[in-house]
């Protein structure tokens, strides 16, 4: 018998946090979105409003559904207040292990005893996260894909001690959100990023070694492998800092040299070239432009 969930708290109001809040609210859940910064929360609400406007224009939802959905979202800067009535918490903070461990210690302290604690981590061990709580059986991964309102997959990750009833509940909940859940076990990178990130890292290595240019690498993967987006463009979209962080988790977890992050990737992150979020990575991004322009730093590596 699965647990009943009505009140959902989302920790973090960035790209993933506001997307997760959007989906839960649109599906009828009461959502408390928590961040340490009210300005960030206001920006998140504006983003959700804008994204729902697009759905209204497309005829996916009505204006009434949009207004009802927005009315279900409340914002908080105080964690204790945000989780007071929570049946489920979904943590969607930065992919940093120390930050997540600290958040889960606080969540365990402030959340009701019955509350399930989920994390949107894309690579960090669920068992490690659960170990800092007194409820490891109620800790689970809900790895949403970006953009959350569009992408169908939720990677449901079991920690070593996750209760079967909790897994069943989150599986059914994912379906209720209109998503397709896939259950995996707790190994570095799980499935999505264990397979995806080494491919991205290999593309960066190929660029680093001068095998081909940015546009060529991405075009080969798009046209030859039917990928909707090339690996270097996808890395920019994910964030090069996130890619670097996940590769480090894989490298530390498995110890094999094949998981070592490319030097070029490390250097770009250290220099602040993080992709879309910083305005430049392998490509350069200009507000309002849909053209894909290779960064001038790699223009000399384009083969004609």
Image (cartoon, rainbow, N blue to C red):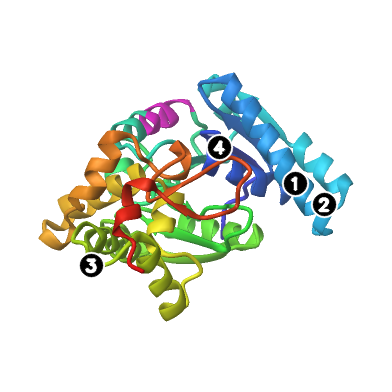
The part of the image, by quadrant, that contains residue 74 is top right
Q: Based on the picture, tell me whether residue 106 belongs to the magenta stretch.
A: yes
Disc 1: which residue? 52
Which quadrant does the C terminus fall into? Answer: bottom left
Mark 1 vs mark 3: give the one in front.
3
Element under disc 3: loop
**Residue neighbourhood size for the residue with mark 2, other residues' Cα within 10 Å, grouped as few (<14), some (14–19), many (≥20):** some
Residue located beneath label 2 in the image: 56
User: Where in the figure is residue 232, as x and y percent of width and height?
Assistant: 38, 58
Structural distance between the alpha carbons of marks 1 and 4: 18 Å
Which residue reaches farthest front?
304
Magenta span includes 158: no
- State yes or no: discs 1 and 2 in contact (Cβ < 8 Å): yes
Q: Nearer the viewer, mark 4 or mark 3?
A: 3
| Contact between labelled residues 4 and 1, with CB atoms less than 8 Å apart | no
Asked if the residue under mark 3 is in contact with the one under mark 1, i.e. CB atoms within 8 Å, the reply is no
| Residue occupied by mark 4 | 10
Q: Which of marks 1 and 3 is nearer the N terminus?
A: 1
Mainly helix, strand or loop, the magenta region? helix
Q: Name the residue under label 3.
A: 211
Q: Give the range drawn in magenta.
A: 103-110
Q: Position of residue 137 (x, y in %)?
A: 38, 48
């Amino acid at each position: 018998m699965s647990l009943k969930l009505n009140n959902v708290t989302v920790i973090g109001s960035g790209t993933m946090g506001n997307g997760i809040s959007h989906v839960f609210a649109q599906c009828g859940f009461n959502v408390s979105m928590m961040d340490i910064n009210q300005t960030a929360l206001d920006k998140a609400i504006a983003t959700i409003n804008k994204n729902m406007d697009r759905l209204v224009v497309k005829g996916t939802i009505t204006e009434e559904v949009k207004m009802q959905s927005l009315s279900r979202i409340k914002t908080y800067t105080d964690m204790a207040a945000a989780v007071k009535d929570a049946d489920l918490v979904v943590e969607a903070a930065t992919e940093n292990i120390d930050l997540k461990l600290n958040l889960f210690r606080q969540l365990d302290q402030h959340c009701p005893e019955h509350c399930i604690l989920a994390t949107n981590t894309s690579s960090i061990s669920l068992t490690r996260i659960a170990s800092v709580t007194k409820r490891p059986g109620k800790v689970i991964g809900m790895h949403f894909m970006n953009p959350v309102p569009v992408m169908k997959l939720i990677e449901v990750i079991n920690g070593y001690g996750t209760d079967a009833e909790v897994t069943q509940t989150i599986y059914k909940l994912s379906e209720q959100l209109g998503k397709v859940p896939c259950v995996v076990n707790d190994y570095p990178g799980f499935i999505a990023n264990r397979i995806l990130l080494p491919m991205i890292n290999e593309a960066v290595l190929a660029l680093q070694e001068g095998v081909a240019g940015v546009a060529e690498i991405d075009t080969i993967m798009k046209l030859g492998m039917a990928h909707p987006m090339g690996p270097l463009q996808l890395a920019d979209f994910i964030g090069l800092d996130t890619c670097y962080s996940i590769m480090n988790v894989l490298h530390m977890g498995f110890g094999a040299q094949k998981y070592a992050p490319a030097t070029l990737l490390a250097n770009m992150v250290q220099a602040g070239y993080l992709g879309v979020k910083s305005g430049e990575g392998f490509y350069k991004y200009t507000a309002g432009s849909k053209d894909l322009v290779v960064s001038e730093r790699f223009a000399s590596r384009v083969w004609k």
